Image: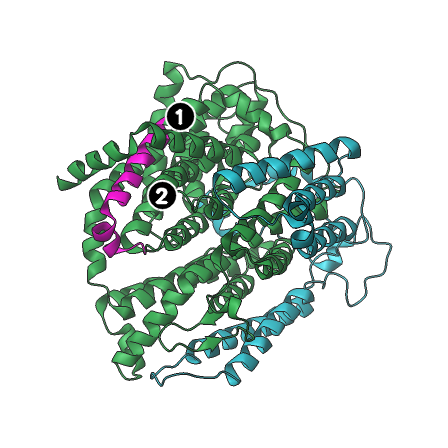
Amino acid sequence: MEQLELLMGGFTSALTPINLLWVLIGALLGTAVGVVPGLGSAMAVALLLPVTFSLEPTAAFIMFAGIYFGGLFGDSTSGILLNTPGHSSAIASTFEGHRMAKSGQAAKALATCAIGAFIGGLIATTLVVFFAPTLVKMATVFGPAEYFALAVFAFLAISAVVSESVIRGIAALGIGLALALVGIDGPSGTARFTLGMPQLFDGISVIVITVGLLALGEVFHIASRIHRDPIVSRIETKGRARLNLADFRKALPAWLRGTAFGAPFGLIPAGGAEVPTFLAYGTEKQLAKRRNDPEFGTTGSIRGLAAPEAAANATAGTAMGALLALGLPTSATAAIMLAAFQQYGMQPGPLLFERSGNLVWALLASLFIGLVILVMINIPFASVWAKLLSIPKHYLYAGITVFSMLGVYAVSSSVLDLWLLIGIGLIGFLMRRYNIPLAPVLIAVILGPMAETELRRALAVSEGDLGTLVGSPITATLYAVLAAALVLSAVQHLRHRSGRKV
Amino acid sequence: MSLTQHQADAGAATGPQGKRKPHFGTGRSEFVVVAVLYAAAVFLTIGTVTMNVQGKSAPGPQFFPILVCIVLYLVATLLAIQIIRSPKVPDNSIHPGHGQFSADMLHDLGHLGQEEDEAYDNAPSQTPTKTWKTYSDWRTVGVLLGGVVAFVALLEPLGWIISAASLFWLVAYALGSRRPIFNIGVGLLFSSVIQLAFGAALGLSLPSGFVGVIF
């Protein structure tokens, strides 16, 4: 149990007063961006990355740990109270959650979410602590062909298997790969697509791309609709969010089932929490039908809310494990975290545990501390957090616009970056307008350079023989699983299409 | 239906506001995306052909861009074909959803049925009260775009505090704030706090502009 010792070391470096302050700031910020629809942890980390650059890495990552989980604590609040989920990870919790709120149990629903997020995150992070070394050992046998297969798997899983329209998913992927190509090509030293501008030799900063797509694109999108969408009414919550023992007993199995669905999905690049939350919701629905639960679908069942909430945070927890041990981002938020590591000159993956072991274990320890702080600030103050929903939108988005400009300018004090930001913001707006998924762009920008390097390395070693890409059992399995998933999703699309015509 | 963006086919959706005659462009504004994709592909093609290649590694620096170009041309063409064959609903009807996830898949995974779809469709934000010529409010987007362009152009001459405060004011105004005088104060406070917190405390260099020259 070497891990426990290392984790204790992590706790001693994370439990200093100043680092506790950073976790608390992260947790507050994370919950805030989670509660407000349209924001989220990915955007928060992207906006904060440049301004935290003068902090030492451990402090910055401890804060990011708070934000990372915090975004999932508040995300179901707007779904429960307004019936409009602010994040796609909260859609599945909206069905039963809003029913509970309508029947006067809003406070109970918010408490169920907070405890569910805590349990899911806690179990998943514990799993990461115990299995990270195993993952690292697995990753050390990976060669160029395996890493390329992993990248292709992530690209296609996120853009084709889980997205609404395969063409739009791949289009998003193409945009991301194209953005990642700009700059000096590492292996050969060739300047590519820089138009001769030296500012572009380092490529387009990941911060410019993420802030443009997630923050400025969202502001343009809000502007295009704010005078048109009708105002939604909010259900008031009164009193403290609390659960009595009977409710707790009822919800506990659902939290655990949700965690069981969520945890494995953190390792699969399926874009985050959406798939497991819906799986968890579906299971609870079937179970309720079997035991004739009268609450489900009428006054709102606590189980139907508890399971998806736990699933979402369990996914986030194990996604952190996949990120740290394999260097594989499985969701948009994880992709931004990877970008954060790269900003500090670190590359997640097997070597990270050797080279920056202290930081990794401090980060894992602060994930635990962050969860405890989050549950402490969320349960007693759930209705206070809900007040964030009534911040006037014009101030909120004015602030976000100014802050995006600040963040991007802070990267390298370059006005060119700001022009790029506006361009990418417009692309982000177009993508939202035409229902093109954003996650594939982020994954492509982050993993694109890695995919290119590994592909060229593999082909250089084999002297151009394409067979080397599918030669090893690991790559063959990855491609086979990917092909099966693609076929399954094609069948599903076709079946639904014929179903709609009838 | 449901969580989604299954937009009805154009023919069916002319219902409530079916007075204007649909012409070829109706519901096909997504050609903008096709244009962006082709533009990116052409840019990459020109860049790849004219690339000044250094070194002679076996799959060289042009190899991967060629793959990306093929993907972009292919996907742009397929998207164009799809838009021509089945245009989306005309611009002025509401179509929610972000397209991030396959609704069909989520439907199956969640065993969703009629009741969830109805609950979602009854969400208040999706009841159109009035229809407009275009789905997007281009006036507000235009004001906002003008604001950020002016900000970037004026940042270095005017300095952070003034330009950021003006940007804040303009965005708040465009998004519907009705307290213009009060907002000048809010904007100045916001930009000055940022200058103090991030400029002085965290050591970011923000341009001081002509204000800095005077003092």
Q: Which percent across, then down, holds residue B198? A: 52, 41
Q: Which percent across, then down, holds residue A372? A: 35, 27
Q: Is residue A120 above or below residue B146?
A: above
Q: Nearer the viewer, residue A4 or A113?
A: A4
Identify the residue at image location x=61%, y=73%. Answer: B38
- Specify the segment rendered in magenta: A347-372
Q: Chain of mark 1?
A: A
For the C terminus of chain A, the image quarter is bottom right
Query: Which residue has dot 1 on it?
Result: A375
Q: Chain of mark 2?
A: A
**The residue tagged with tag 2: helix, strand or loop?**
loop
Q: Nearer the viewer, residue A302 or B131?
A: B131
**The residue tagged with tag 1: helix, strand or loop?**
helix
Residue farthest left in this picture: A1
Q: Which percent across, then down, holds residue A305? A: 46, 30
Relative placement, left or right, of A9 versus A61 is: left
Identify by letter the chain in green: A
Q: Chain B appears what colour?
A: cyan
Q: Residues within 10 Å of mark 2 (few under 14, many from 20)?
A: few
Which amino acid lies under the numbered mark 1 shown in the image of this protein? Val
